[in-house]
Image (cartoon, coloured by chain):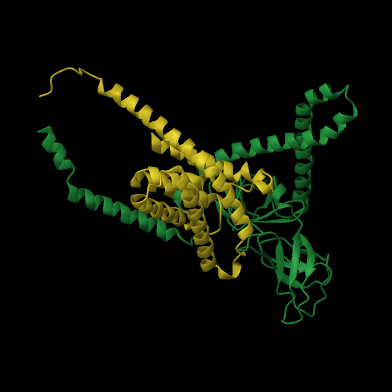
Chain colours: A yellow, B green
Amino acid sequence: MRFFIFLLLGVLFLALQTTVLPALPSWMGAPDLLFLLIVFLAIHLKAWPGVLLVVLFGIGSEVVSGYFLGLYTVAYLLVFFIVKGLAVHFDLTALNHQPPLVVLSYLFANAFIYLASFMLADENAVPWAWGAILQRVLILTILVVPFSRLFLALMVWCDRRHRTYSLFSRKRGNYYKARV
Amino acid sequence: MAYERRKKKSNPVKRFFLVATLAALAVTAVVTTVGRKEFGLSHRLVFEALGPAQSVFARATEAVTGLWRHYLDLVGVSEENDRLRQEIKRYIAINAEYREAVATNVRLNQLLDLAHSLEQPVLTAHVIGRDPALWFKTITIDKGISAGVEKGMPVVTVEGVVGQVINVSPRFAKVLLATDPNSAVDAILQTSRALGIIKGNGQGYRMDYVLREKEVAKDDLVVTSGMGGVFPKGLLVGRISEVGKDKRGMFHTITVQPAVDFRELEYVTIILKANSLAE
């Protein structure tokens, strides 16, 4: 249930980021909502479903953005495993830890994509744009807490629905029959 | 008994090998895609799945921005006459829809004129997505292999050169804009006939390899030379906005202002091959 809800949410974010958000005035930037979701999944989801979702989101990002394939998938997977590794030692579920975590991982992912594209075609490099990237980081910093709350609420709702369904399914058949 | 059977199934050694094999396959699959430019099966499937969602959102965005633009236009008029204000408000939505339809009609007519002026068959496509990244400039269009679109086909509008198709799936295609640093277009200066190559720099273009002995001036028009075999000859690329003052080196340092406003792209024309499916 969680898997499919987050998959749908990721597809929605990708569609929004390539259609609605670029139409906003430039001072609003283009918030990378999918990245917020990936960081959240790294903290809260188990490794396997998380990795599968991140790979799907990476492929999704590649088909709508960029020239070389594979960069987004690898960048997102690296972010996923680094955050997952950090989550073992630190309590990253606390909301006050989220803004610095998202800022650092966003800068890391962008630096990775930039450097990888530079290495694949060094004569075609576009200059690193500190202004634009800081604007996006600022927007993500503002959005991270409300969106984390939203994702958390969605996850709790999924778990509750899942529990209700499992209770129903347990009652099927002769529930009170003695088990041998 | 049932418990033993279940225990047998979840043999930890077997499970470890299964998970390790799957992980190795997944890592190999991901790593081997790095740096590739051709879409594989997974990319095509995801593109096909994402395309319809983008299409819906793109149309919704256009409708909303159209309404907003026309609403802003009419605010000044409504202030002139208080008596008509209520009526104007009532008609804003309808009016905006009509204006949008007329604007679309005009644009499509212009594209049709462009189609008549080109020798090759052409196809009009709707822009349904834009690249959200800072480092790349691409768009997604709603025509793919089934409409005869192929990798490498040039994409233009009435204003000029837009870019080139880089990836295709059955119903959608990705276009590398001419402003992307990975794009290169063979071009010529209209007045001095100096040849060069237009390269994207993220925002606009720079024109490389124009010999210093050639006369170059601000506001000179840059058109496609037709030499690369991709773009037909004579399509407008842009206008020279700056010529570098550096006297060293063999070539001029030229900055070119694109003829196309890439932020306003809604419809584009794909120039097909003579034997294309859509002909």
Residue A57: percent from the left, percent from the top? 47, 47
Q: Is residue A71 visible?
A: yes
* Horizontal side, residue B1 vs residue B19: left or right: left
Above or below residue B145? Residue B241 is below
> Closer to the camera, B52 or A104?
A104
**Residue ID at (37%, 50%):** A90
Residue B151 in picture, x, y percent from top left: 58, 56
Instruction: Left or right? Give the position of B1 relative to B176.
Output: left
In the displayed structure, A130 sits above or below B64; it is below
Residue located 79% across and 80% down the image: B213
Among the 4 quarters of the image, the one containing residue B247: bottom right
Query: Seen in the image, is A76 located left or right of residue B188?
Result: left
Identify which residue, B217 or A92, lies in the foreground.
A92
Residue drawn at x 80%, y 71% as measured from the top left: B193
Which is nearer the eye, A27 or B44? Answer: A27
Q: Is B250 located above or below residue B34 in the figure?
A: below
Residue B146 visible within the image: no
